[in-house]
Image (cartoon, rainbow, N blue to C red):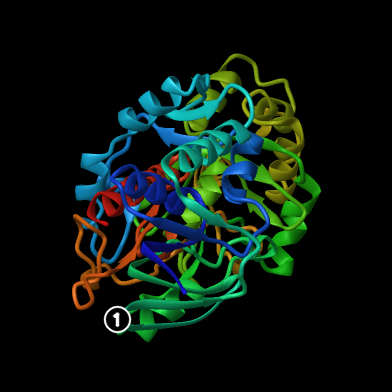
Amino acid sequence: MRRHDAIILGAGAAGMFCAIEAARRGRRVALIDHAKAPGEKIRISGGGRCNFTNLDIRPERFLSANPRFARSALSRYTQADFIARIERAGIGWHEKTLGQLFCDGSAREIIAMLVADMAASGVELHLATQVGEITHGDGFHVQTSAGAMQADKLVVATGGKSIPKMGATGFGYEIARRFGLAVTETRPALVPLTFSAAQLDAIRPLAGVALPAEVSAGGIGFREGLLFTHRGLSGPSILQISSYWREGMPITVDLLPDGDLAAALAAAKQAGGRQAVASALGAHLPEKLARQIVARLALAGNLADQPKAALARLAREVHEWQLRPVGTEGYRTAEVTLGGVDTRGLDARSMASRTLPALYFIGEVVDVTGWLGGYNFQWAWSSGWAAGQAL
């Protein structure tokens, strides 16, 4: 039986980063993953360019039953630390919007950097390797398809349930429960919302239309892009609000968040108002969307023909469009999993179990979920780094 100081389950962002940090500190580390290649979520993220962090990381932009839990790791290994790391590796990057950072080239550059760092530090990488029974006695005993392994410490970096076609499962939650840790409710997050057949009748004809919007629910709102699709609504604003939305809750969409439609229409009417209502609205919204809204409200004739009440109703429809989603597209398209291993059972500084200090949980498997835009990768780097210092 091969003996190690630490076995890490999961060769994603958090697992690889933790393995590197521990190995650089002289630990004998085995990293195991059932996938044929490491870092598959890194590879597909950001359209293949990996939105690897955000310039404006703040603990309050992470959801958790204990919002303070993430502060320690995020403050000790920051976005500036990771930026410096990829710059030392010669990886170019750029900012897109709202502090989101992407590789100039391919996300594969970050994977290559991590794989090279693992090789240089002596990490023993086992890919296409299935994990079986895990027991704890004289250290941890892990049965794998590559043979039995033993280690003093075990790190679970297996991620959540999102994107099952890439092999995502709830395995990490099973391990947590097996060793007495609680798991909070899990649900898809950063995911498109779905709607009833009646609501889809209005949404489907607009498939492909995109515009800036502010989407709010439960007292929080996000002003980002909105995309109409054949299945419902998507785009950054929808993905963001999906982490806060719950079944039965309505969402409010402002289709013109940077304008005052009532004032604009009043000014256009005063200037003559000879144009059709749809044309007047089309000056502010995509033409197809403008026409549909006007038809839905049955506003016929020119702008000059409309009473104040009708134009006020049109402005409300644009600024306060209310919908009631029936669900989400689920883990199939969710970028992350909300919820996970209960942070009350973990030490915020080391990521170790409070009842079994040789057992660690890092990354997405933990009940810490960031906003869209590089936050979840930063949590992977930070939590992986924190555990790596403790192994």
- In terms of depth relative to the viewer, which is nearer, 303 or 113? 113
Farthest residue, direction top: 271
- Check disc 1 and report the residue beneath it: 138
The residue under the point 56% across, 64% down is: 324
- In terms of depth relative to the viewer, which is nearer, 287 or 156? 156
> The disc labelled 1 sits on which kind of residue?
Asp
Say few, some or many: other residues with alpha carbon within 10 Å of mark 1 (under 14 / 14 to 19 / 20 or more). few
Q: Is residue 13 above or below residue 285?
A: below
Farthest residue, direction front: 1
Q: How many marks?
A: 1
Quick check: can you spot residue 343? yes
Q: Is residue 235 above or below residue 127?
A: above
- Which quarter of the rendering shows the C terminus? bottom left
The residue under the point 26% across, 67% down is: 343
Q: Is residue 378 above or below residue 133?
A: above
* Image coordinates for residue 283, horizontal then vertical, percent: 66, 23
Quick check: can you spot residue 310? no
* Image coordinates for residue 100, horizontal then vertical, percent: 46, 31
* Image coordinates for residue 316, horizontal then vertical, percent: 51, 44
Farthest residue, direction right: 205
Q: Determine whether the residue tagged by mark 1 lies in a helix, strand or loop.
A: loop
Q: Is residue 289 above or below residue 65?
A: above
The residue under the point 64% across, 16% down is: 272
